[in-house]
Amino acid sequence: MLDSNKDSLKLEAMKRIVAMIARGKNTSDLFPAVVKNVACKNIEVKKLVYVYLVRYAEEQQDLALLSISTFQRGLKDPNQLIRASALRVLSSIRVTIIVPIMMLAIKEAASDMSPYVRKTAAHAIPKLYSLDPEQKDQLIEVIEKLLADKTTLVAGSVVMAFEEVCPERIDLIHKNYRKLCNLLVDVEEWGQVVIINMLTRYARTQFLNPNLNEGGESTFYGSDADQDEDEDEDKKDEALSKRKPYVMDPDHRLLLRNTKPLLQSRNAAVVMAVAQLYFHLAPKAEVGVIAKALVRLLRSHSEVQYVVLQNVATMTIKRRGMFEPYLKSFYIRSTDPTQIKVLKLEVLTNLASETNISTILREFQTYIKSMDKDFVAATIQAIGRCATHIGEVRDTCLNGLVQLLSNRDELVVAESVVVIKKLLQMQPEKHSDIIKHMAKLTDNIQVPMARASILWLIGEYCEHVPKIAPDVLRKMAKTFTNEEDIVKLQIINLAAKLYLTNSKQTKLLTQYVLNLAKYDQNYDIRDRARFIRQLIVPTDKCGALSKYAKKLILALKPAPILESPFKDRDHFQLGSLSHLLNTKAGGYQELPDWPQDAPDPSVRNVEVKESVRAVGTVTYRDPEMRAAGGGGGGGRMEGRPKSDSASSSASGSEQSGSGSEESEESEERSDSDEEEEEEEEEAKKRKTQKKEPIEATISPSGSLKSYELLHRITGEGLWVEYCFSRQPFLPDPHMVAVQIQFTNSAATEAKSLPGESATVVMGVDFCDSTQAANLQLCTHSRKFFVSIQPPVGELMTPSFMTENEFKKEQGQLMGMNEITEKMQLPERCQNEHAIVQRVIAAANLSRVPCGSDKECRFAGRTVTSGSLVLVTVATKESGPSQLTINCEKMVIGTMLVKDILLALTQ
């Protein structure tokens, strides 16, 4: 089917192959048959061939290299999907020999008119970097260019490329910081996560800590502070009192304000990203807003719950208060997996306080009855932690754990013994009865850790049970050889302690135990036995240490502190893999510390030329017709991008602003200027009552095509048309001059519109793109959203050159920069005059002298970048004519071919 001449059969074959790939089957054997169809003219077949090649190009590199010329041609295809797929395949061929070709293709794609192709170029950057790291400097230039892109489709991909190639180049973010903050809501979810994580680290290097002037929090583990810590707190308070009051940077506030709506996202990763941003960057009083969003995620799948609970467990250690209202949301369901149950237990334990401990302990009593043994063991440990940190319930918890010692389940009893041992270390003198009760359990409990804990307790507090301890040692000596290593070590310790405190009863037992240990298979036990014998049994050869045997062995041991495993995990960025694993993962970027002094905020200001600042305002050429606010139709015309920037170029692809604050200032300024200019206008009218009005220097030309900007019905009587005057825009020659005609057909007179009509000229920087410029047309009563879309031919300005210069430039723009199409000219377009007239009507080009009657040549340059555009129309007496376009920008050349072909053949 792949070798068939019918495209329908090829399409069916490719669909089946792609379906096999989707099911995980290996189709690499079909690579030679598939790669032959890469030149197929059917777009649907070509798309599927590219999908296949992306999958297998890395495995079959030699065969893929044979089709590299086809991929290069695909980069010039009019279809944006084909151009993007060709670049994707090219970047998937992991061969260093084509690195220059890949670099050239990425640079061209970064300037492509299609945002989808520019997005693909951003995806290709990390691939090329991993293939050849020496290209880093050139790739950084491409990244810098793509970071300035205003399209939401590109933003996430280029930030990902930035993170992969040059995360240390924080200076590239300065000028684009505000734009990224404003675009964040409209970026796709994957891009939102990447941008938020990057902006989190950026903010930690550029802004001051918002909680700097606040005192330290009393954390879950901060109740037993010693005197030294109190002194440190006093020093901190003195330092805080000397600091200046904190004022949040407006850019810091912009980031927090623009990310807050994303807490309502349906994507759990986006919500988690915003939550970690607020936790690491927001003032303590504002962090609470993330709690509700995180609790909402607990209704999701178990995998999402696991990640969210890991982060909540870390947050509750330092910010316990924000989750306390949602305590019941962390109650455990019987259907929860064990790992979810354990994490919810961790959160409940961290949230425990004097006010809610009774409720939490009642929950724990229910959990102990569960059939899940691991969960029950975790619950018992949680009870021990609550008893450790909340003294009021310590006795209650201890009594409850003692009751569990009579449980039929040996694992429950064993875990209870371990926890009781830790609790008894805090107040052993009050609980000698419990120690006696536990001593009796040595005959029944077989879990090694539990037996070792009981023996340690009896040995440590043998003075509280002087009659029971020797008997326990006697029983343990009988079973010494059959015990686990951990139990044997505790038997030796018990024997040593009893020998020092009650040698009359235990001297022989101790020697017996030490002799057994002397020949044990485990060398740790043998070494411990030799050490203890030399330390406690007096001989002629004993060293100086034997004098201090009692101080060494019977020294007071500090009570253990039961801490959460999440206590010190917040030094990793929340939501990251490193935080989840509690170890640094590959590619992890450390979260920077807050700066001591605020860096210069002016680095984020975007410098805009004066001519660009005035672009959004309509400018009259006739001094008699200047309206208030500089606008026609009774108001002002301003370029307002979606990102709320103040000074904009009215361009869909090159709008730049300096934040919402400047926007408010500029509006207030224009309103005040309006009143002053109205007074000047009245004075001028009084002086020129007897004079004839001067006509505007620019009048609509009949040969120029007009477009409707605002219909008279929509505009409530105000009708606006525009055309491209093809004259230089004097304030800035890099802008396209747009001539706008305002006509007032309403019954009421429009404010600031002299007479029934007015003609104005506006400069727009389209950045060599046919993307529409979105504007606001404001009258005294209403605002109208309008857009100006330029044909590709209007993005050029004529360039005058000789025939030799034309040939020289054409010779330098060959290969990928040349597009040739054949056409059949109609009879009325056979003569030279008709060809010239139609080409110049389609594109703003100048005629180049030519010695041949069969050729017409035209030249021009793009208005913004000055890229050269050369057009050649060659006619033949017999056969089709030929249209050739040489252009530095391939996409502009492709679009121009279509327009000129249409103009010549219709």
Image (cartoon, helix red, strand yellow):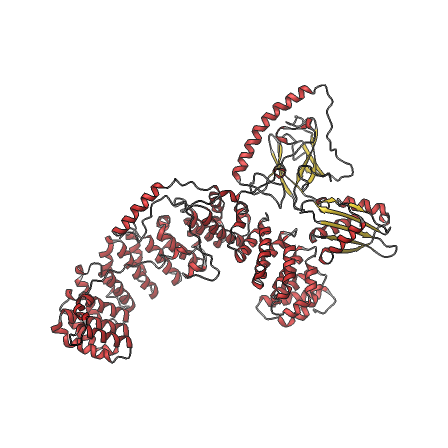
Q: Quadrant of residue 476?
A: bottom left
**Above or below: residue 261 compared with residue 536:** above
Residue with the most extreme bottom position: 519
Q: Does the rendering let one see residue 484? A: no
Compare residues 52 and 247 and report the one nearer the observer. Answer: 247
Front residue of 544/562: it is 544
| Residue 549 horizontal/vertical position (percent) | 18, 69
Does residue 88 lie above or below 851 as drawn? Answer: below
Horizontal placement of 181 versus 242: left or right? right
Q: Picture coordinates of residue 51 (x, y %)?
A: 63, 63
Q: Quadrant of the N terminus?
A: bottom right
Residue 582 in percent (x, y) is at 40, 61
Residue 289 at least partly seen: yes
Give 729 or 409, whichever is nearer the viewer.
729
Residue 75 sits above or below residue 203 on the image = below
* Quadrant housing residue 52: bottom right
Q: Is residue 34 left or right of residue 159?
A: right
The residue shown at (38%, 63%) is: 338
Q: Where residue 717 appears, x then y in whole percent?
A: 67, 31
Residue 601 lies left or right of residue 395; in this view the side is right
